[in-house]
Amino acid sequence: MGRRIRAAVLAALTIGIAAGCGDGAETPSAGGAASASPSTTPVAPGPPWYDDVAPATAATKVGPTGTSCELPITFDLPAKWKAKPVVFNPDFAELIQVGGSTMSCEIDAKPAGNIGFMRVWVVDRGAVIGARKGLEEFVAKYGKLTDVQYRDTKAGPLIATEVTFMEESELTGETKRGRALVVATRFGTMLLTLSGTDTEEFEAMFPAFQLAKQTVSVTR
């Protein structure tokens, strides 16, 4: 099943209750201490990291109790982005489970004028294998990827690992840029992805990803 077809099916699945939230601060998964500082990474303007892109203006939050998706993490979203929880259905497991991670929330950019999604995933074995390993397993199963690069970074106050890559479309054979970010909390290891229909859409949506990354915190 093509990934764009899968995206259409996923839109029909995104109703229900997402993962619960709770009080706490970041703690390590296996494989790393949360109190350590990630290595210093020079600012990299333009692709593949786009560090020079300013974050979008915050309009709402996702994650806290009472929001569309209740999650172990919270972060800001720009105006009109629409968050919906994803309910696990074993009949569609292949659509919402990738490399040991399960989709918990889908955030649609179409109401804001772009074609693409940010998605929040629970790394099911994160506490056992560590956040970085969980991200690597996700990437290994995500699709036909090239130019895969990892780096240590920060997401809000949390230690994070992120990856940039080019993904080959199963429908057109063309490549497009994507991004994923993983953080570990005492309530679970969480992964955030950004993907558009093509690289142009990805770049148009990237300020929203920058906003999410800079405002990530543990849900109180």
Image (cartoon, grey):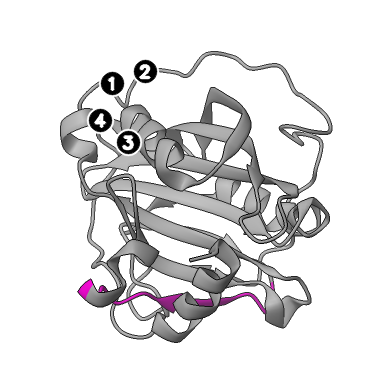
Where is residue 208? Give x, y as percent: 68, 58
The part of the chain drawn in magenta is 79-90
Where is residue 48? Give x, y as percent: 74, 32
The answer to whether residue 187 is left or right of residue 183 is left
- Rounded to the nearest angstrom, the CA distance separating label 3 from label 1 is 13 Å
- Label 1 amino acid? Gly
Labels 1 and 4 touching (C-beta < 8 A): yes
Where is residue 131? Give x, y as percent: 32, 33
| Residue labelled with disc 1 | 32
Q: Which mark is residue 134?
A: 3
| Residue labelled with disc 2 | 36
SS at mark 1 in the image:
loop
Q: Dot 2, how many residues are within 10 Å of its Cα: few (below 14), some (14-19), or many (20+)?
A: few
- Rounded to the nearest angstrom, the CA distance separating label 1 from label 4 is 6 Å
- Rounded to the nearest angstrom, the CA distance separating label 3 from label 2 is 19 Å
Q: Dot 4, how many residues are within 10 Å of its Cα: few (below 14), some (14-19), or many (20+)?
A: many
Disc nearest the viewer among 2 and 1: 1
Asked if the stretch drawn in magenta spans residue 159, the answer is no
The picture quadrant where one finds residue 117 is bottom right
SS at mark 2 in the image:
loop
Labels 3 and 2 touching (C-beta < 8 A): no
- Label 4 amino acid? Pro
